[in-house]
Image: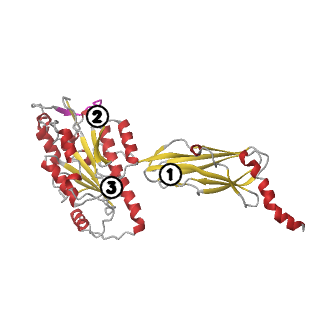
């Protein structure tokens, strides 16, 4: 009979030993910063403190699940606290993709001694104390200043020469126009003429800074597509690059992952070109398609680079390309913005894309009709073993450079 009563009353006793003391367990969460680059780690420290003389054998910690973070522990963790004991539980969130997500504690629950009841001690509390939004920024990769992708194509150099007599590269020996000399230690980097240096294989600087270095115009193609299997253009690309065509059929389960990898590689490549261009003294003009229209951003220092990182962290690509090639790239906006600029043709222009289709080809050719040479940078899932390959004169771009980068390639080692 005694055993029967003990079994009947054990749940009640177990609950009474826990419920009255649930407010004696204090939880503190420390998240040191609210932004991190992709690949970075955020350490979350959870401090628990038992203010009572009663032990708590089962305390369940539930960590936030974030799609763009990977956690070092399991999302659910059980610990115990003795009388007046303190414990610190640390987990690491590794940023695996750009975006904004909440990390930290989603709930802390007490369980009774026989594990029948479960009581949340965070219910009706201020959730901002336990979980915060953390922004994962696209990685900022450094290119070498001598990377070919920073120098522009031969066609853009010729256009710059024609559009600005004072920039004629043949005048570097003292004839009318700019004069140049070899680089000397102590000369500012922004005076180096990188195109002329690449041609002469010697660093050359301007004696006269009348106009400065031309700016670089970067355009992000907003339309992306990952289903590239069994396409004629895929065969043509591989033939141009001297690589046998591949007809890989992707599982639908991998579709979103492939798209995400493609998006991030495009943004990281764009940022690498912008960041390194600014570091060597170039002004950068970035065009993004947002909210149904093209917006222009001037980038000229580290602060504006960081601002663009934030903007691209939550940038949304368009899923369905427009059939009207005239709306694929911001030609009208660029021409309207630069109509009074006599250096329009000389400005280097570069398009970053993950979708090489006929509309993009026509849009690039449309720029050429205005005398604007456009380099194209293609990031492709099917070129994983090709490093920054330059297929100049390809069918997508008859005038400017055409670069192909695989999604698994190291950007810092490409384009050399």
* N-term mark: 1 or 3: 1
Q: Secondary structure at mark 3?
A: loop
Judged by depth in the image, the label closer to the viewer, 1 or 3, is 3
**Lateral position of residue 411 relative to residue 359, left or right:** right
Q: Let me know if residue 138 appears in the view.
A: no
Q: Is residue 208 magenta?
A: no
Q: Nearer the viewer, residue 233 or 103?
A: 103
Q: Residue furthest right?
A: 1
The range drawn in magenta is: 180-188
When the figure is inspected, residue 353 is found, relative to residue 196, above or below; the finding is below
Determine which quarter of the picture holds residue 196.
top left
Q: Nearer the viewer, residue 335 or 406?
A: 335
How was this image coloured?
secondary structure
- Circle 2 sits on which residue? 189
* N-term mark: 1 or 2: 1
Determine which quarter of the picture holds residue 395.
bottom left
- Circle 1 sits on which residue? 94
Q: Residues within 10 Å of mark 1 (few under 14, many from 20)?
A: many
Q: Main secondary structure of the magenta part?
A: loop
Give the number of marks. Answer: 3
Q: Residue furthest front?
A: 124
Label 1–label 2 contact, CB within 8 A: no
């Amino acid at each position: 009979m005694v055993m029967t009563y003990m079994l009947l009353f054990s749940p009640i006793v177990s609950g009474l030993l826990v419920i009255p003391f649930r407010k004696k367990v204090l939880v503190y969460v420390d998240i040191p910063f609210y932004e991190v680059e992709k690949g970075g780690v955020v350490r979350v420290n959870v401090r628990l403190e038992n203010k009572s003389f009663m032990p708590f054998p089962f305390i369940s910690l539930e960590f936030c699940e974030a799609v763009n973070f990977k956690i070092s522990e399991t999302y659910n963790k059980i610990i115990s606290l003795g009388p007046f004991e303190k414990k610190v539980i640390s987990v690491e969130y590794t940023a695996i993709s750009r975006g904004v997500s909440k990390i930290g504690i989603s709930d802390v629950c007490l369980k009774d001694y026989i594990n029948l009841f479960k009581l949340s001690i965070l219910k009706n509390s201020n959730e901002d104390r336990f979980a915060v939004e953390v922004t994962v920024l696209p990685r900022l990769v450094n290119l070498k200043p001598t990377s070919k992708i920073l120098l522009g194509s031969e066609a853009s150099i010729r256009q710059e020469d024609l559009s600005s007599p004072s920039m004629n590269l043949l005048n570097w020996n003292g004839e009318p126009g700019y004069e140049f000399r070899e680089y000397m230690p102590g000369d500012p980097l922004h005076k180096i003429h990188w195109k002329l240096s690449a041609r002469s294989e010697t660093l050359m600087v301007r004696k006269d800074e009348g106009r400065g270095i031309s700016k670089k115009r970067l355009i992000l193609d907003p339309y992306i597509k990952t289903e590239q299997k069994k396409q004629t253009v895929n065969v043509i690309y591989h033939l141009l690059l001297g690589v046998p065509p591949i007809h890989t059929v992707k599982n639908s389960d991998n579709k979103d992952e492939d798209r995400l990898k493609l998006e991030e590689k495009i943004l990281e490549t764009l940022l690498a070109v912008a960041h390194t261009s600014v570091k060597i003294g170039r002004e950068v003009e970035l065009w993004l398609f947002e909210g149904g229209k093209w917006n222009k951003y001037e980038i000229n220092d580290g602060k504006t680079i960081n601002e663009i990182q934030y903007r691209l962290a939550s940038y949304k690509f368009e899923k369905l390309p427009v059939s009207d090639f005239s709306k694929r790239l911001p030609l009208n906006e660029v021409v309207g913005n630069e109509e009074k600029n006599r250096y329009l043709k000389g400005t280097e222009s570069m398009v970053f894309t993950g979708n090489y289709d006929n509309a993009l080809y026509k849009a690039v050719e449309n720029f050429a009709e205005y005398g604007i040479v456009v380099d194209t940078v293609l990031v492709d899932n099917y070129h994983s073993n090709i490093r920054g390959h330059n297929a100049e004169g390809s069918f997508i771009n008859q005038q400017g450079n055409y670069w192909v980068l695989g999604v698994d390639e190291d950007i810092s080692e490409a384009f050399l």
